[in-house]
Amino acid sequence: MSKLVRRKRIHSKIRKNISGTSEKPRLAVFRSNKEIYAQIIDDTKGHTLCAVSSRDKALSSVKGTKTEIAKEVGAALGKAAVTAGLSTVVFDRAGYLYHGRVKALAEGARENGLKF
């Protein structure tokens, strides 16, 4: 079984139990080999409330390892969520292990006001 198939299987199991509402939206993470993306989604309406990625112009000047950049993405997402009036979210790690870049993104978001 390939890593991608394994991750998709785990992600489908996670998404069976996790859903974002307007009171408590879902923080979804996608990690590619070079970049990391995070968005806060209201699944009842099917809307993305805010999204941040390492490809954004504001974060393109950040230098460092991929883990350090992921922490900055989490910090930017936390700030954007607080300005949008969101304080609590449900974390959707999308089948990735809670380790490395995914963990750094979560810690950056927590340090900037998100609770999950």
Image (spheres, grey):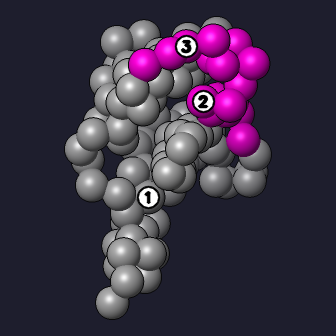
Spatial CA distance of label 1 from label 3 is 25 Å
Q: Residues within 10 Å of mark 3 (few under 14, many from 20)?
A: few
Q: Earlier in the sequence, mark 1 or mark 3?
A: 3
Please name the amino acid that badge 3 sits on: Val
Q: Which residue is mark 2?
A: 54
> What percent of the width, then of the height, locates residue 88?
44, 27
Please name the amino acid that badge 1 sits on: Ala
- Labelled pair 1, 3 in contact (Cβ < 8 Å): no
Q: Describe the element under mark 2 as helix, strand or loop.
A: loop
Quadrant position of residue 67: top left
Q: Which residue is mark 3?
A: 62
Q: Is residue 32 above or below residue 50?
A: below
Quadrant position of residue 16: bottom left
Spatial CA distance of label 3 from label 2 is 9 Å
> What percent of the width, then of the height, locates residue 100?
27, 40
Q: Is residue 10 above or below residue 29?
A: below
Q: Nearer the viewer, residue 58 or 87?
A: 58
Instruction: Please give the name of the residue rendered at 39% of the width and 26% of the height, measured from the top-left corner.
Output: 65
In the rendered structure, the answer to whether residue 45 lies left or right of residue 81 reads right
Q: Quadrant of the N terminus?
A: bottom left
Q: Please state the extent of the stretch shown in magenta in the rendering.
A: 48-64
Please name the amino acid that badge 2 sits on: Ser
Q: Residues within 10 Å of mark 2 (few under 14, many from 20)?
A: many
Residue 94's tag is: 1
- Labelled pair 3, 2 in contact (Cβ < 8 Å): yes
Residue 51 lies within the magenta run = yes
Q: Earlier in the sequence, mark 3 or mark 2?
A: 2
